[in-house]
């Protein structure tokens, strides 16, 4: 399968008055043509910063310290800003987390849709208008000619999100990055937006990276999932691997926190205790060790390697070492084993 994006040993830091925040630490992954890749993890895990690094949209105090970001073999890290402008919107489109702050309030939706078409595709104003109307129609916005003349504040939340998707897709990019595309939308609109993204992926054959803190969102949308924590990818695998054979305690915690509609008995959700690591002073060992009920002495001292579970499933957890004690995780599915849980403490 052709790889359209390859991220290799990416390290991104932010320089603040308090010191260097190591937001992304040695992250590597591939994105194949036509697939949907989910990147999940709680706030501060490095998901959005990884994608902002790919797009070259870091703030002034942010810097890619090390690594490669290869788009069809071309290293984006080495590209000057003028060349990156040709990549953004043209080869990689992005749906930002909050469409109200991402859309320019003083320009009409039509102006904002037409600008990249005139810049990247060299269309004249009439051609750009026709293409923009076509895109609004494609993403399910009614009366597109009328909507072209309206401003972002005249759109509902769901409509703004659809307009953002139209803008991200208007130049037919190879890759669409969607950063929390359903945040702050009601459940019905969430389902519509996710269904729309799946339809557009099938229609255009593009690759999608879906960033979210909600495993439920990626369950029906993504082929593969990367689980991030403390600036690192701690587990990667197919959706089936992650949901039915997870191999990292952080993934177990995320799965436990999803409500199960099939449960007849009402149960409290089980949050992950503790707080994320301070990336001003990242731990030398596993970043999740301080919050992990299965942590062993080695977890505090040495970062685990990516243990291979199968050809596309890897987990950075010492419990996958051949000499580690065997544990049966509690995934909220009635398979808790207290004895094995405590035996891993070592």
Image (cartoon, grey):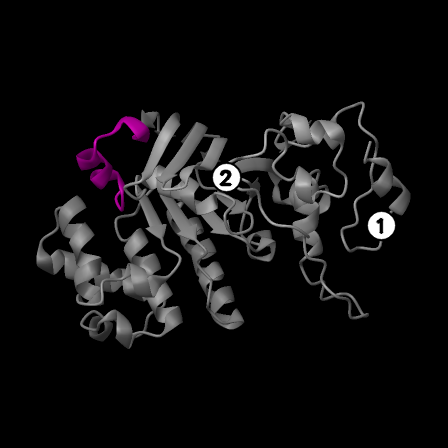
Residue at mark 1: 336
- Quote the CA–CA distance across marks 1 and 2: 32 Å
Name the foreground residue: 226 vs 191.
226
Tell me: residue 238, above or below residue 162. Answer: above
What residue appears at the point 66 percent right and 45 percent down from the top-left corner? 251
Q: Residue furthest front?
A: 18
Name the foreground residue: 220 vs 334.
334
Question: Seen in the image, is 12 located left or right of residue 244?
Answer: left
Residue at mark 2: 279
What residue appears at the point 67 percent right and 41 percent down from the top-left corner? 290
Res. 197 visible in picture: yes
The image position of residue 174, as x and y in percent, is 35, 41
Question: Seen in the image, is 75 located left or right of residue 242?
Answer: left
Q: Is residue 227 magenta?
A: no
Q: Residue furthest top?
A: 323
The image position of residue 158, as x and y in percent, is 40, 70
Q: How many circles with numbers are drawn on the protein? A: 2
State which quadrant residue 58 falls in.
top left
Tell me: residue 102, above or below residue 120. Answer: below
Segment colored magenta: 76-90
């Amino acid at each position: 399968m052709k790889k359209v994006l390859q991220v290799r040993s990416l390290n991104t830091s932010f320089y603040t008055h308090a010191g260097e925040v190591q937001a992304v630490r040695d992250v590597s992954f591939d994105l194949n043509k036509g697939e949907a890749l989910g990147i999940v993890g709680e706030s501060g895990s490095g998901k959005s910063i990884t994608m902002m690094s790919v797009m070259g949209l870091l703030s002034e105090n942010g810097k890619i310290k090390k690594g490669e970001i290869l788009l069809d073999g071309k290293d984006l890290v080495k590209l000057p800003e003028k060349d990156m402008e040709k990549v953004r919107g043209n080869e990689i489109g992005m749906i930002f987390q909050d469409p109200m702050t991402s859309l320019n309030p003083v320009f009409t939706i039509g102006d904002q849709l037409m600008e990249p078409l005139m810049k990247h595709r060299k269309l004249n104003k009439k051609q750009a208008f026709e293409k923009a109307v076509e895109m609004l129609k494609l993403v399910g916005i009614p009366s597109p000619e009328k909507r072209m003349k309206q401003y972002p504040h005249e759109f509902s939340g769901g409509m703004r999100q659809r307009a953002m998707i139209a803008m991200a897709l208007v130049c037919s990019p190879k890759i669409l990055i969607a950063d929390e595309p359903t945040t702050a939308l009601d459940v019905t609109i969430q389902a519509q937006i996710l269904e729309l993204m799946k339809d557009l992926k099938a229609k255009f054959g593009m690759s999608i990276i879906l960033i979210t803190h909600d495993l439920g969102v990626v369950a029906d949308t993504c082929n593969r999932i990367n689980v991030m924590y403390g600036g690192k990818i701690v587990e990667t695998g197919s959706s089936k691997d992650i949901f039915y054979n997870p191999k990292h305690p952080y993934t177990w915690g995320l799965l436990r926190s999803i409500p199960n509609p099939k449960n007849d008995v009402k149960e409290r959700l089980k949050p992950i205790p503790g707080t994320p690591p301070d990336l001003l002073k990242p731990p030398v060992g596993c970043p999740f060790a301080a919050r992990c009920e299965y942590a062993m002495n080695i977890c505090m001292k040495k970062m685990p390697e990516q243990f291979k579970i199968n050809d596309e499933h890897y987990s950075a957890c010492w419990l996958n070492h051949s000499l580690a004690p065997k544990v049966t995780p509690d995934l909220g599915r009635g398979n808790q084993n207290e004895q094995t849980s405590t035996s891993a403490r070592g």
